[in-house]
Amino acid sequence: MRRSLGLLAGVPILLAACGAGPSDDPAGRSAAARPAPAHAAAGVRLVKVGSFDHPLYVTAPPGDHRRLFVVEETGRIRVIRDGRKLATPFLDLRNQVSCCDERGLLSMAFAPDYATSRRFYVYYTARNGDIRVVEFRRSGSPDRGVKASARLVLLQRHPAPNHNGGLVLFGPDNLMYVGLGDGGGGNDRHGSRGNAQSLGTVLGKLLRIDPRASGGRAYTVPGDNPFVGRSGVRSEIYAYGLRNPWRFSFDRANGDITIADVGQAEVEEVDFAQRGGARGVNYGWRVWEGRRRNYPGEQAPGAVFPVLTYTHAGGACSITGGYIVRDPRLPALAGQYVYGDYCVGRLRAVRLSAGRARGDHAIGVRVPRLSSFGEDTDGRVYATSLNGPVYRLAAG
């Protein structure tokens, strides 16, 4: 994610929808009850649900219709309960997190059995720049996590301050997916072929693991992962050839996966696969940036190109991926993937299917410094601004 530019250009993005290759940084009453409406638009409007300190992600525990959790880049997780922001954070990691630009507390995920296990996970960059995925437990109160319950699940050294990835997310198979960037710097400059094309590192990858401790191991690798049993290959890898998969999501209706991979100097991209279809896929970076050859003379075996790309013309700089909307209260966007760009801020929607994207269009609302999207238990979609506001997408 390119957060350091912070330009708010109000001009169109040039887009290309493709059939069948990544950008550079210098990045009761519901939880949304009775908020103030903002930015009305035909069919879609934004409803402000609260203001926070550099909000980066929104989620909710499985089956919890009262609470919304907001992740702040600076290190706290805040709770909105029945439409009101609680004064006491759910968890405060500010003394452990390095912030900001592309570092910080970047996301959280609740275990599928959270109601009984009380397990949840956070993804953050530590004071020394390491990427950490850590398990915590909730206390007896559903509004408080227990900081002392921390258990390290995944530790990855990171050579640069940018391209940290940033998302942990449980998929439809109840396993954890983790998106990591390529290690930072321009043109994936690590090693002879870069990290993203190397199966010997988890950088530049989408991982798939069972994060529960077992047999003295911090996590286990599912036996049906695509590279299990191959010598010299990290078996956690599910998909590779990614530059900085800042945000990806699963369609709650069918398990399809969409990956918004932040590009380098020219092209942003959206990758899409039907459920299970991203298994073992090479998405092409650093050889390809979108459909543009980025590194002449190198090959990306079997590279799968994005279904949608757009250029940096008009002030765009960094894609912010969202969700395929399944909120029955938002018929104008039903079945469409919502996304935007950090520098432009205009939200867009497009229909995705295997090998293609169609009907890409602006939906008439804008979120300055669009940092992320989120989804609650009921399928409502949220957008966060690094300036502070969190909005819910609602019918206009």
Image (cartoon, rainbow, N blue to C red):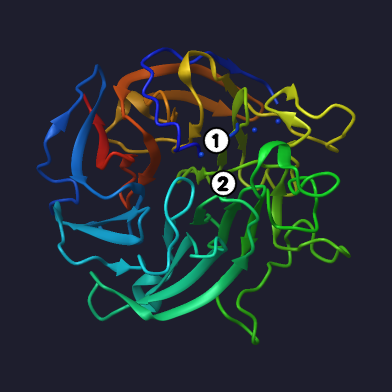
Q: How many marks?
A: 2
According to the picture, the residue beneath numbered tag 1 turns out to be 26
The residue drawn where x is 26% and y is 59% is 78
Residue 63: in sight, yes or no?
A: no
The residue drawn where x is 14% and y is 31% is 37
What amino acid is at disc 1?
A: Pro
Q: CA distance from mark 2 to mark 1?
A: 8 Å
Residue 82, image quadrant:
bottom left
- Position of the C terminus by quadrant: top left
Disc on res. 164: none
Disc 1: CA contacts within 10 A as few (<14), some (14-19) or many (>=20): some
Q: Residue 390, position in %: x, y?
A: 26, 42
Against 65, residue 373 (above or below) is above
Can you name the residue that lies furthest to the bottom here? Answer: 216
Residue 239: in sight, yes or no?
A: yes
According to the picture, the residue beneath numbered tag 2 turns out to be 162
Disc 2: CA contacts within 10 A as few (<14), some (14-19) or many (>=20): many
Against 350, residue 177 (above or below) is below
Instruction: Give 377 or 168, whichever is nearer the viewer.
Output: 168
Q: Residue 145, position in %: x, y?
A: 31, 73
The residue drawn where x is 50% and y is 65% is 126
Q: Secondary structure at mark 1?
A: loop
Left or right: residue 169 compared with residue 362: right
Labels 2 and 1 touching (C-beta < 8 A) = yes
Q: Residue 357, position in %: x, y?
A: 57, 22
Instruction: Give 25 or 348, whichever is nearer the viewer.
Output: 25
What amino acid is at disc 2?
A: Asn
The residue drawn where x is 51% and y is 57% is 168
Left or right: residue 385 compared with residue 308: left
Q: Secondary structure at mark 2?
A: loop
Q: Residue 193, position in %: x, y?
A: 83, 44
